[in-house]
Image (cartoon, rainbow, N blue to C red):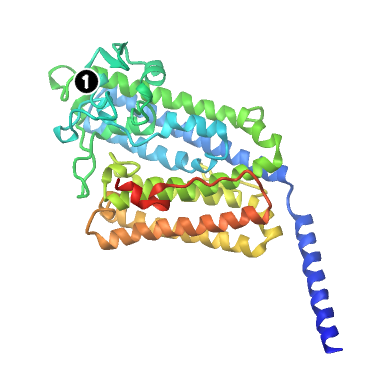
Amino acid sequence: MKILARSLTFALAAATTLAAGHAAWADAPSADAVLKNYADIALAGYSDALEKAKALDEATDKLIADPSEATLKAAREAWRNSRPFYQQTEAFRFGNPIVDDWEGRVNAWPLDEGLIDYVDQSYGTESDENSLYTANVIANQTITVNGESVDVSKITPELLQDKLQEAGGIEANVATGYHAIEFLLWGQDLHGTDAGAGERPYTDYAKGDACTGGHCDRRGEYLDAATDLLVSDLEEMVGNWQEDGAARKELLADPAKGLSAILTGMGSLSYGELAGERMKLGLLLHDPEEEHDCFSDNTHISHLNDVLGIRNVYTGRYERADGSMVEGPAIAELVAAKAPDIDKEIRADLDDSVGKFEAIAKAAVGGEAYDQQIGEGNDAGNARVQAGIDALITQTRAIERAVAALDLGGVTIEGSDSLDNAGAVFQ
């Protein structure tokens, strides 16, 4: 009788749990509602990024028209202000092909900056991988790409996008986007893992005899074309997330595929992209050239906002540039309905990651920039960055458990040699 009683107790408990699970799922939002809010957050994020890019464009126009310490400082500040809102949109990559195909136009890195402008002698004069390593478009009227002469006498958005971006099929030939603009505003950071960012003088945009670096008028033309192009590229992506936009339509066409896109984006940005390519690689090599915003020493801000963007997507909440909130049904609610313990785990992991990246940012604001934190021999800084990497890996594992709980197919989380095969990094 005791065995029978125990069996009956377990059966009743299982039935109660199953019933509770069904009730929780019945109360959960629909996949369509979750995807609509996800698309609304994407639209809001790209719209904020666009407005900040327009402000950057205006600030650089003023620098070009009236070069001074003040206008250069204002242009740099506008660039810094543009980064958080764009970086929070990166969680929409990987799972959304329209975004992933476009992203390289606005945020590709690292770049061989000698393609664009003059560089220090320490940069070198040639590369076995890139014949355009020191092409210096600003200083020349023509360049040679794959044996063919290309007219670069007139620097326009079309030239940058159609002829120079990834010229010769080389990804390091980054001619457009935030990092090309960053280089034009700061110049090379020649401090290695010591204190200091790029120190381009405002006179690189000066008129007549006051010009430094040579070809100041063409440098202004390049900066003007690059910022104009950034605005138009972001306008395109805002259009893709409007009610009749291609990205929104593709997302909503197949709810199961759409939910997979959300978790693919979260996991791939967490693991392969941020923890791996943007962080672990630079930490392994102790190489400041592998940090994301390497000219401006703004990397701590970009990394933190990537992590915030991942949390935004999971919780279905995004704070806009004007302080208003976009929020609604979230994939977190679907995970909670199927596996409440996993939902709690992911939320805790996301908060922990944000805390770890806030610590990195606090150190940077306190005078220890990200490139210093990854420097060889900086044990405390290295440990701080590694803690951020570890937190990202931990949250990725929880995201993978959410994929299993929701029984979603088509989720492939991108890896990175620096995490999965570190020995290859040194070969």
Number of other residues with Cα within 10 Å of mark 1, as a class: few under 14, some 14 to 19, many 20 or more: many
Asked whether residue 301 appears in the rendered view, the answer is no
Give the left or right position of residue 311, taking residue 330 as reference. left
Closest to the observer, 352 or 108? 108
Three-letter amino acid code at the position of disc 1: Cys
Q: Is residue 386 above or below residue 40?
A: below
Specify the quadrant that holds the C terminus. top left
Q: Position of residue 341 (x, y in %)?
A: 63, 65
Front-most of 346 and 229?
Answer: 346
Numbered disc total? 1
**Location of residue 117 in the rendering, given as x and y in whole percent from the top left corner:** 24, 25
On the image, the x and y values in percent for residue 349 come to: 52, 60
Occupied quadrant, residue 249: top right
Q: Position of residue 222 (x, y in %)?
A: 31, 21
User: The N terminus is located in which quarter?
Assistant: bottom right
Image quadrant where residue 105 sits? top left
Decide: is 115 above or below 370.
above
Q: What residue is pinned by disc 1?
A: 216
Q: Residue furthest left?
A: 209
Residue 207 visible, this angle: yes
Residue at image position (21%, 20%) is 216
Q: Secondary structure at mark 1?
A: helix
In this rendering, would 414 be left or right of 244? left
Query: In the displayed structure, does residue 220 sit left or right of residue 413?
Result: left
397 or 378: which is nearer to us?
Answer: 397
Q: Residue at x 65, y 36 (%)?
A: 251
